[in-house]
Amino acid sequence: MMTKYPKRLAALAALCAALACPAPAMAGYIWNETGLTGAGDGLATAQVTFDSSHNSLSQIHGMLSSSTAVNGDTIYQVDLYQIRIDSPGTFSAWTTLSSAFDTQLFLFDAAGMGVYSNDDDGVGLTSLLPAGDPNNLLAAGVYYLAIAFGGFSAADGANQSVFLPGAFTDLLTADPGSGALNGWMPGFAAGTESAYSYDIFLTGATNAAIPEPASLALVLLAGLGVYATRRRQPRQLKELQS
């Protein structure tokens, strides 16, 4: 087989090798929260970002609305997004003054385990997950990014905080003894039922809804094997008939 179709095999092998490596992202795109109910607050209901051109994900725009009041106070929902970090060394996420409320950002890995969280960036009530944090070395892959009102805590199945305690301006790391994200402990009361829009800006990220490049390469290699087998069958049949 290797000597029979050398040019085709070489071309397909080169294609598989290219697909096995992350493609360079083009100009960034903005993901706008979709659907009547918007992004959910759990791993199963997170909104999956997608761009058919595989451009980098530069911004997420959405809106937090109030849910059922707790003890007479208006409590807002949490929005969770599935993203893909394709450049771990440069990944960052932050909110700006365009989000006219006290924001908080959370990052979880593909299994829902905490990575880090920040309430206030030290300048104001906006939030920052900085690039290149030496205490949080990331690997490329799927992650979950959440935004909430300040004061919220991510909880695991035992209703324990996923992240270690700290000051509002600290970059909180995951509690080693915690489990995966399973719910939320409400933060500060908003004092209003108005919906709040937000913008999350990102670097080093792209859309989540693409097949793993290595898996795609394996599929192509499998298809190559089927193709070569089918090409051999007519010749073998002719040899038997003769």
Image (cartoon, grey):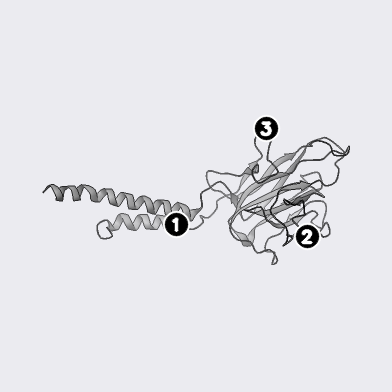
Q: Residues within 10 Å of mark 3 (few under 14, many from 20)?
A: few
Q: Residue at x 85, y 39 (%)?
A: 70
**Earlier residue among tags 2 and 1:** 1
Type of amino acid at the residue the image marks with label 2: Leu
Out of 142 and 162, give the one closest to the viewer.
162
Disc 2 from disc 1: Cα separation: 41 Å
Out of 120 and 138, give the one closest to the viewer.
138
**Earlier residue among tags 3 and 1:** 1
**Earlier residue among tags 3 and 2:** 3
Rendered-image quadrant of the N terminus: bottom left
Disc 3 from disc 2: Cα separation: 34 Å
Q: Is residue 148 above or below residue 91?
A: above
Q: Which secondary structure lies at badge 2?
A: loop
**Mark linked to residue 18:** 1
Measured from the top left, where is residue 158 in percent x and y? 75, 52
Q: Residue at x 71, y 59 (%)?
A: 130
Q: Is residue 15 above or below residue 73?
A: below
Q: Nearer the viewer, mark 2 or mark 1?
A: 2
Left/right placement of residue 72 relative to residue 23 reads: right
Q: Which secondary structure lies at badge 1?
A: helix
Out of 173 and 3, give the one closest to the viewer.
173
Residue assigned mark 2: 164
Type of amino acid at the residue the image marks with label 3: Leu
Q: Nearer the viewer, mark 3 or mark 2?
A: 2
Measured from the top left, where is residue 82 in percent x and y? 63, 47
Measured from the top left, where is residue 52 in percent x and y? 53, 43
Q: Which secondary structure lies at badge 3?
A: loop
Q: Residue at x 45, y 51 (%)?
A: 216
**Mark linked to residue 36:** 3
